[in-house]
Amino acid sequence: MRNISKTGTIHSMKREKHICLSITAHVDAGKTTLAEAMLFEAGQLKTRGRVDHRDSALDFEDFERTRGITAFSKQAELNFGGTDFSIIDTPGHADLFSETKRGLRVPDAAILVISGSEGIQADTGTIWALLREQRIPTWIFVSKMDLPGAEKEKILAELKSELSESVIDFTDSENLICEEAASVDEICMEEYLSGGVVTDEALCMAIKNCTVFPCFFGSGLQMTGVRPFLEALDRWTVAPEWPDAFSALCYKIGRDARGQRLTQVRITGGNLSVRNPVRYLNSRGKLCEEKVTAIRIYSGARYEVVETVSAGQVCSLLGLTETAAGTALGEEELQPEEIAESVRRYSLAFEPKQDPVVMLARLQELSEELPELQPEADRHGLSVCLSGRMQGEMFKALLKERFSVQAILSEGRVIYKETVSRRAEGIGHFEPLRHYAEVHLILEPLPVGSGIRLESVCPEDTLDRNWQNLILDAMRGIRLPGVLTGAELTDIRICLASGKAHPKHTEGGDFREATLRALRHGLMQAECRLLEPVCHFVLTVPAEQLGRAISDLRMMHAEFSSPQQDAETVRLEGSIPAATLGDYPEMLLSYTHGLGRITIHPIGYQPCHNPEQVLENSDYNPERDTDWPADSVFCAHGAGFNVHWTKVKDYMHLPSVLDQQNRREQTEAGVHRLQRIDDRELEAIMLREFGPIKRPQWTERLGETGKESKKQPSRKERTILIDGYNFIFADPELKKIALDSLDTARSRLMDRLSNFCGFTGEQAVLVFDGFRSAGNPGSREEHANIHIVFTAEGETADAYIEQLASEVGKNDRVAVVTADTMIRVSAMRSGVLRISPAEFEHELEEMEHQLEEILNRSNLLAHQTQTANVLTEREKKEGKTL
Ligand SMILES: Nc1nc2c(ncn2[C@@H]2O[C@H](COP(=O)(O)OP(=O)(O)OP(=O)(O)O)[C@@H](O)[C@H]2O)c(=O)[nH]1
Ligand SMILES: [Mg+2]
């Protein structure tokens, strides 16, 4: 068997090879110690520091040195053999997992460190899952092999069974490596079977494709196994092929000791030189172009200033102001950072007292480096999200160091979310003087974990695309609060269904106002539901403590699968509401005398297990949230007025989209199976009720030009039942007249309606309430071509309409114009066509406008005819012929 060759194509490529490796593991596994051992072995460090002696080169921040823990990812450079390596050492503490994940965005491969004395930990499983999900080639280094209890064979067996069968011991002879690689990788197998060898090239590809995970043993502290590890990394890694055009991916924002902003990137294509302008989209999608003022290559706290960097290198860029973790520079594609779900929010106080505005700005600056903080200022004051005690301490230390302020953190409140449980339509109207916008949104629930989906189904001929974009943008990138507790909305589809602009008066801001009002209006009507954060947990306890553990978990409303016994310990796995966890990890340690372990990771949101209690404890009142009004602003007589959200539907200018949809769906689904009456039956009932129908006589009224009226678009004739007083008081103009004289308002409405029916050929029954007039027997009369009903004492107009609609409403052509009775009418007989006073007012106005045009035309025609006649007379007199 030929041994794996050290020469060949891979070797010849080595001169320009640049490889980026991220070191990751659970807390205290020995990552930083291993990284420094590699640097020392490669000659990059002249003296070795030690984490425990507070003189480590990589854990150089004060907080890190006092705690003996890595809090921020660090970069270090080393050259070994023919390879330039950039190493990113990441934190291992579960609280700092967001920072770990940032450090895993750009490497060619990860080094997973296992502590030889402790073996695989629960957090190792979480990291392994992330590495597999992101398909990051993984090298394993089992460190601390110098400690008692570290057994190579035992750990290897554990790695193979718990992580992957493809973990291969690379400290074995090369023959054995070949054999094992052939057993897990197809290409290696082909080579091995045909020639009894596996080439370096095939092995490199197997590692790169994650079909082989090389495993090494040694000690970072004792410097054993480090050199063979570096040799293997040099030999079996291949650099990616980078494109020629400049591109780079930012994995993290940092600050240097002087507070200068560092955009930490990996160059993923071409070259970059100082003073080159770079283009990128910031997190709000705005295109930025800025000059790079300096390029630094860091190794721990020290850095080298360079003029140019090329593809493969990791460096820090100065001069860029709007970059963020995930920002793509040049040709790279934007990969925004997914901020991990935070479980708790902590209110902040400061010692000495600080100006909240200044502090919010500082927190925002800090959150460039730690986006998971998500600082906020609301009615509770300033607050941040923290993932646990360790992150809290780190955060306080940072505030002290950077801004010399002492932060006091509250207990922390669970971050709930809200969603809707059924479909609803939100209507928002914004029309102060010389402004105009109306927006209709349909809100619908989405499955758990979907987030917010913004869409439009509004045709562009209803509302211009630019306006539509403005509407959707108004809801994008901001935290939209729900109406139950003011918690953030999620798992909801918000669909723009229709909207209206004014040709002259609409400005962009009007749509923003109308949109947010529409959203709130919709939420107030939809049934809303509270969601709570849920964590995945793995709990191990000594077998004799199983009973206690199960009863604790039940008390905490956890869900879990059946226990798995392993020698002396039992393992339980499942999900648990974050709200019930409290200080369980500490309690567990105490009752198991340090033998019990629990790892917890937030996994998302589920319906809340105790919504009543949460709502009871919340002091949120959506009607008093002035930042998020559900009311609308309409305009009458040149002035805007507020319309309470419960009444917006009576005033809206566009018809309700949901009502139309519901009607359609009901008909389609055959839900509405009531016996329909045909047109002849309708005519018969109307004849019985009101006598013969007077048809409009526009031809008579308009004289010769009456032909014109026939050219008008003939809408399908309807029979309209109108709640008279309800309409008068919903219409600002009629209402004003009515306050002076109810009689005048009634006559005015009758005249308008009569014109409307004459013009459209429709029938109208106008019903006035005589309910309160003592001794009133009620009456029916004709006003020109419309029927007027005054109900008798004790009979309300809506009761009358209800009764009539129940008879004639089973015909598609019957519509009821009403606001107050809407609920009763719809309950009485779903499927009856309802029109709001505002919609009908619109129809009236449209008709009046057309009528005016016709009259103008007829006057003009009459005038022309008259002139022509005069001319003809004159010409006759003058003896001329036409
Ligand atoms: N005996 C022994 N101790 C080690 C070895 N490697 C690290 N340690 C010790 O283990 C502790 C943690 O080491 P670090 O290198 O800080 O571990 P880490 O994984 O970087 O820790 P975090 O970054 O905080 O997650 C320190 O006390 C080290 O001295 C080793 O190979 N042998
Ligand atoms: Mg470390």
Image: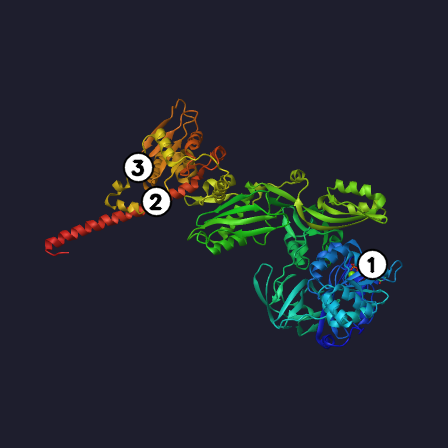
Q: Residue at x 56, y 61 (%)?
A: 286
Given the current orientation, which residue lies at the most extreme front position? 194
> In the depicted view, which residue is nearer to us: 826 or 246?
826
Residue 558 in the figure: left or right of residue 541: left
User: Which residue type carries mark 3?
Assistant: Arg
Other-residue count near label 1 (Cα within 10 Å), few / some / many at <14 / 14–19 / ≥20: some
What amino acid type is highlighted by mark number 2?
Ser
Estimate the spatial distance between the alpha carbons at disc 1 and disc 3, rounded to whole Å: 95 Å
Circle number at residue 714 = 2
- The answer to which image quadrant residue 723 occupies is top left
Q: Extreme right residue here?
A: 148
- Residue 877 percent across, percent down from the top left: 10, 53
Q: Disc 3 designates what residue?
A: 695
Looking at the rendering, the quadrant in which ligand 2 lies is bottom right
Q: Tell me: residue 781, above or below residue 473.
A: above
Q: Nearer the viewer, mark 1 or mark 2?
A: 1
Residue 446 spot, x, y in % from top left: 59, 47
Question: Is ligand 1 closer than 8 angstroms to the Cβ of mark 3?
Answer: no
Amino acid identity at mark 1: Ala
Query: Marks 1 and 2, how far apart in space?
Result: 84 Å
Q: Mark 3 and mark 2: span between their CA atoms? A: 14 Å
- Determine which of the numbered discs, if any, sits on residue 759 in the image: none
